[in-house]
Amino acid sequence: MRFQPIEGALVSTVVVAAAAVGGVGLRGLMVEFLELDESAAWTAEMRLTVVDLMARDKELTGRRRREEEEEEKMERGGIEEKLGEKELRQSVDEVSNLALDIGGSLIKMVYFSSNSGSSVDDQVHGSANGDSNHSVLSGRLHFEKFETRKIDDWIGYLSSKQFRQYGAQCNQAPASDKNIIKATGGGAFKFADLLKEKLGIILDKEDEMDCLVTGANFLLKAVHNEAFTYMDGQKEYVQIDQIDLYPYLLVNIGSGVSMIKVDSDSKFERVSGTSVGGGTFLGLGKLLTKCKSFDDLLELSHQGNNRVIDMLVGDIYGGMDYSKIGLTSTAIASSFGKAISKERELEDYRPEDMARSLLRMISNNIGQIAYLNALRFGLKRIFFGGFFIRGHAYTMDTISVAVNFWSKGDAKAMFLRHEGFLGALGAFMSYEKNDPADEASHQLVKQFPNSSYCIEDRVQSSDSTYASDNGCIECRLQVAK
């Protein structure tokens, strides 16, 4: 397994897009990357369709704390929101390419907003004949989530912020059908008529697996410090060697779990899955603890002790390890195994202990199944995504321990900072399919081989670009005039 930082690369990484930009935002964005030597001249073909998305990472602890505080306030009011209201109000004025992932539990949104007055803050010159001129727009990719069960509140939010205006504007569509928004997930089918009736939005549905893979590939290639490992309380960022990225196993944990073997940008296969996922955790958790939300259940698990309910190896062997087969005394022999006691009923157990045991059981199960599938296909890289994880330390640690145990240390579980938005981001990327320059952009992309590139090889210390956990990714869009 080769994960090495890329050093000394004198390149500029750009995302190739069908950039027929005529007045309002992006017309398309492709999850393909172009490497240019710093001294290389821009060709005429490059000038036609290049959008430069230069997302760089910088931890902004203060901003992230404010976002979390704002999220807690919004959750108490019934709506989960990742951005502060003032910041969102300022950014919505110049929004483009809203995309949705409507799942069984959560609605995820991704959209781009350009910063006010940023259209001419930078210029890029240079071409074969010296006449290329590109304006640079700075802005953000925003990530937000809402509970699907509160879809009426979400529709009201979309209406109040006029998000319905920010889909694709297809010239071929009738005047009444111009508000077309890319969407994926089962809810894109379930709620299509409702959104058309309430907001006049037409959902252009994208395949769920396609979007998950596209979103994951983009994050792993474009966002510095996107992937990380977590074990024993230690978080360590992983620098991805792009040459060695494929193949990998993508484990998306939503209400259920899908496991996808990714061989390239365009080749992938769903190889397994399980119905025991986030929906199981919340469903059983509500029955056992009376918690009303996923976050309440996670918070409750913080205070619990699973050893009160789980039967450990030491409980069977009188406090001793079963060293012959590599089991320590603290290993779980049977989840909820101590609940078989005839002397105790449900009310005799603390809700926080049950929440902890339930989280441990489901996380262990997912980690083991993921590794078995990785073993089946000879994969060393396992990336976990989906809102079940939510950056929760105990969840990540449990999955990591399971993968480490079953692989005997040969494989590591890796997590993504924007874990819950893979599908929505993939839907966002699919806007390029509607662009009239689509064919030209595809031909352009084919000219450039896949090789090592790192978003942070230039302007590494710049404050103009960064990625904050789940909140937004600051980026600059380089648009041909």
Image (spheres, rainbow, N blue to C red):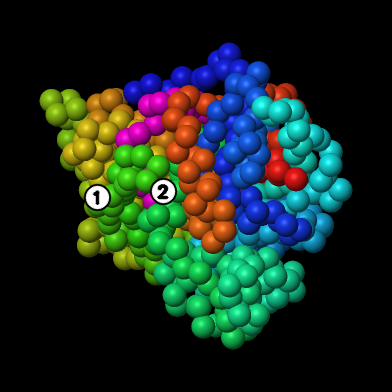
Q: Is residue 307 above or below residue 254?
A: above
Disc 1 and disc 2 in contact, CB within 8 angstroms = no
Percent across and percent down for residue 16 are: 57, 42
Towards the viewer: 393 or 457? 457
Percent across and percent down for residue 378 are: 22, 33
Q: Nearer the viewer, mark 1 or mark 2?
A: 2
Towards the viewer: 442 or 456? 442
Which residue: 25% across, 52% down? 272
Residue 118 relative to residue 245: left or right = right
Which residue: 14% across, 29% down? 325
Towards the viewer: 13 or 340? 13
Percent across and percent down for residue 390 are: 51, 49
Residue at the spot of label 1? 271
User: Is there any visible trace of residue 329 in the rendered image?
Assistant: no
Q: Residues within 10 Å of mark 2 (few under 14, many from 20)?
A: many
How far apart are the two marked residues, 1 and 2, measured between alpha carbons?
13 Å
Identify the residue at the far front of this view: 129
Q: Is residue 241 magenta?
A: yes
Element at badge 2?
helix
Q: Which residues are magenta?
A: 234-252
Residue at the spot of label 2? 213
How many dots with numbers?
A: 2
User: Is there any visible trace of residue 221 in the rendered image?
Assistant: yes
The part of the image, by quadrant, that contains residue 42 is top right
